[in-house]
Amino acid sequence: MPPKLDVDAINSMTSAISSLCKMNEDLLKQQLESMKAVGELTKSVAELTRTVAQLVTKQDVLLDRVVKLEESMAKNPVGKNPQSSSYSDVTRIVTRAIADQDVQREKSRRAVIERFPELDTEEATRQRDKQKIAEISKEIGVAADLVAAAIHRHGIRREDSNRIIKVPFRTTEARDKFIRYFNTHRKKHFPKAQADRIVTCRRDLTPLELEIHYAKLKECSYLNNEAGCYKYFYRDLEVFPCKEPRPFQKD
């Protein structure tokens, strides 16, 4: 006679195997979740690495400009060129170049429009600004990246000056495209009287860059006055010689 099967033992073994399979399945799920978490962490680290690399590059550019600023000051007697300053000023600027890295990412997606005249009321100015900016953004295909709700005039309204307009975008690429188009097609979108006043657009600058910005504007004005014509022009924290100098416009 064949041996009698122990049904209880078989059932017990089947149950144990089933439990082991379930445990193995749970372990596989945990491993997959861990792998997914590691993948997301790796992606975050890669993005952080790119951001740090951009900041380091930006710092190097700023420091290089500070060195050029110091060299320029050494060539000009203190008090003659408005750009001239002291060594302590240069040291202060270098120190601030490091601190300004913290605001680079926030400003890297903002454009700034300068010298666009304001209207009689705050509300009329706000509506006109947003309409004009939306119109230009749509024309060049960056309307989807424009953060229209955050467009605003910066500072306190004054009778003797026009506040800058801060224009935020969702990407640096959209901002750069807007700035390039704005400055190239300025006369198309603004009346001649406004275009003649040079309504311009630039990127949003850090406090350190603003110091260099205004110093370079003064330097450019000084050099042109010395030459008696428009022989130099300013762009993005640098002063360049014109290919063809132009005479000053008569009033």
Image (cartoon, rainbow, N blue to C red):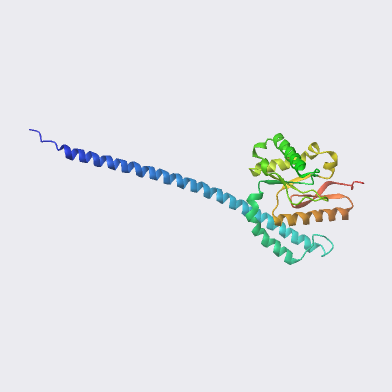
Identify the residue shown where x is 86% and y is 53%: 224
In the current view of this chain or complex, which residue is farthest to the left?
1
- Residue 144 % position (x, y): 65, 37
Res. 241 in view: yes
Q: In what quadrant of the picture does the N terminus appear?
A: top left
Name above or below for residue 246 compared with residue 65.
above
Identify the residue shown where x is 70% and y is 56%: 207
- Residue 99 % position (x, y): 64, 59
Identify the residue shown where x is 77% and y is 45%: 200
Q: Looking at this view, is 235 or 129 the one in front?
A: 129
Q: Looking at this view, is 232 or 172 the one in front?
A: 172
Res. 142 in view: no
Q: Looking at this view, is 42 or 21 the one in front?
A: 21
Name above or below for residue 186 compared with residue 238.
above
Is residue 138 left or right of 251 when viewed as pictured? left
- Residue 57 % position (x, y): 64, 53
In the current view of this chain or complex, which residue is farthest to the right?
250
Identify the residue shown where x is 30% and y is 40%: 21
Is residue 76 left or right of 47 when viewed as pictured? right
